[in-house]
Image (cartoon, rainbow, N blue to C red):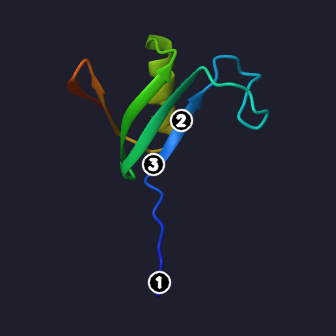
Amino acid sequence: MKLELNRVTSHLRIFIDDNKSTGNRDPYDTIITVQHISDTEVHLSGLKGVMNREILKEIEQFFREQGVTTVTFERHGKQQSRKD
């Protein structure tokens, strides 16, 4: 029998204070579930916490640096996407 595990979801935790981290077991300001559709596409869901334009720009930059070119999410019941 062969078992293979593909990690297709992760959690993006956002700390507004740069001195906080998961390593210190600090509480996060925002958490988002990330579904990895492919190496270049992710879907965001389950946002809880603080969100504003500055945080959204940081998220987009973070994924750009990871090689992700398409970020999709739902907002007010409509599918949205950001592409490079």
* Residue for badge 1: 2
Residue 13 locus on image (x, y percent): 58, 31
Q: CA distance from mark 2 to mark 3?
A: 10 Å
In the structure shown, which secondary structural element does the residue marked by tag 1 occupy? loop
Q: Which mark is residue 9?
A: 3
Between 20 and 49, the one nearer to me in the picture = 49
**Quadrant of the snapshot with the C terminus:** top left
Residue 76 locus on image (x, y percent): 25, 17
Q: Are marks 2 and 3 in contact (CB under 8 Å)?
A: no
Q: Residue furthest bottom?
A: 1
In the structure shown, which secondary structural element does the residue marked by tag 3 occupy? strand
Q: Which mark is residue 12?
A: 2
Query: What's the amino acid at mark 1?
Result: Lys
User: How would you rate the neighbour count of disc 1 (Cα within 10 Å): few for under 14, some for 14-19, many for 20 or more?
Assistant: few
Q: Which mark is residue 75?
A: none
Q: CA distance from mark 3 to mark 1?
A: 22 Å
Left or right, 60 with respect to 29, comes to left
Residue 50 locus on image (x, y percent): 52, 15
Report the residue at 47% width, 88% height from top. Answer: 1
Report the residue at 74% width, 24% height from top. Answer: 20
Query: What's the amino acid at mark 3?
Result: Thr
In the structure shown, which secondary structural element does the residue marked by tag 2 occupy? strand
Report the residue at 39% width, 45% height from top. Answer: 35
